[in-house]
Amino acid sequence: MDDAKQVRTVVISYARLPMLAMSVLFYFLGASLAHFLGDVVNPAQFFGGMFIILLVFLFSGWIKGYYDTQEDMQNRLGLEAFSPKAFLLAKKLLWQGSLASLVVAAVLVVFMGVQRLLNVPGSTLLLLIFGISYIYSVPPLRLVYRGYGELATAVVLANLTPALSFTLQSGELHRLVGMVTFPLTALLLAFQLARSLELYASDMKYKRKTMMVALGWQRGMTLHNILVLGAYVLLGAAALFNLPWGITWPVLLTLPLALGLVWLMIRITNGAKPAWKLLTFMSASLLVLSTYLFTYSLWIG
């Protein structure tokens, strides 16, 4: 692979396209909650907030890449013969991309503020999202390699993003937001643990302190199973506290998939040959399907 292709691979990889796609899904979930509670979804607020979120996440991903070492890039992305010239060019483009994303996001925030499309609760949540995304990627805190990166990502994506979308439409928070998003936060955190398990040996070797490394693989795999099953406990508790049954039961249909995922993780723990692609696929499917079923039931409920 020549230098240009390597640089392109680096820039696209640090854009974290799957995360951007998930952010859109979670953002749409928040607007669906507002619709369910009787608010009329304002297109300008909806799309303005969504573009700001996407730009903030782009900034966070690209600035993380800028601060990664050449060795981090090469081993994380599986690049061969990653030349110093390509590394320096990649860093330059990552810096420029992160700066451009931040500037455009700031312009959109000012525009929405001038047009009175950005209320106080929404502004507070947006500031919180940016703050966590910043310390996730940028030294000295850099949560991504301190064992808290997965937790920060789960909170920002599955909790704060839907909450922002909801408050932009409603002007305030509602207990229904937490009832829906906390189970999804658990599933998102479980997905990240499952995905990082394959890279455990590499992360240990290069001293990248992910949550799985911080916990150790045995405790990390146990926590994964607790989170998957705990998501359904949280869902059941929400139903007891008056989460409408029409929203609850569709998500319960994913329970067999969750049990299959836990069984697969237990097999790996007991020494079975790891099926990494199947593990990642099942974990991602459980998260996406649960989020979709929540969203669908909110629109038809």
Image: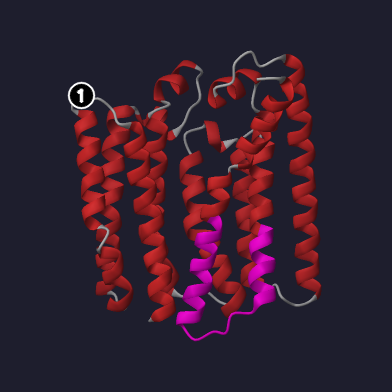
> Looking at the image, which residue is at 80% across and 38% down?
96
Q: Residue at x 42, y 73 (%)?
A: 175
Figure check: 101 above or below 87: below
Location of the C terminus (image quadrant): bottom left
Whole-percent x, y for residue 173 in the image: 51, 74
| Image-based side of 26 in relation to 182, left or right | right
Q: Nearer the viewer, residue 213 or 79?
A: 79
Q: Name the quadrant of the N terminus.
A: top right
Between 64 and 16, the one lying in front of the other is 16
Left or right of 289, for residue 33? right
Image coords of residue 202 (percent x, y)? 45, 20
Magenta residues, start to end: 23-52
Q: Position of residue 217 (x, y in %)?
A: 32, 28
Amino acid at the residue labelled 1: Gly
Quadrant of res 243: bottom left
Residue that lies at the very extreme toward the front in this rendered image: 1
Q: Answer with the quarter of the image where residue 105 lies.
A: bottom right
* Residue 258 at x, y percent in the picture: 26, 51
Q: Which residue is mark 1?
A: 271
- Residue 50 is a magenta residue: yes
The crowding category of the residue bearing disc 1, from other C-alpha atoms within 10 Å (few below 14, some 14 to 19, many at least 20), is few
Q: Residue at x 37, y 58 (%)?
A: 289
Regarding residue 75, the answer to whether it shows in the image is: yes
Q: Secondary structure at mark 1?
A: loop
Residue situated in front as seen by the camera: 282 or 2: 2
Label count reads 1
Residue visible at 34% across and 52% down in the picture: 286
Residue 263 counted in the magenta span:
no
Image colouring: secondary structure
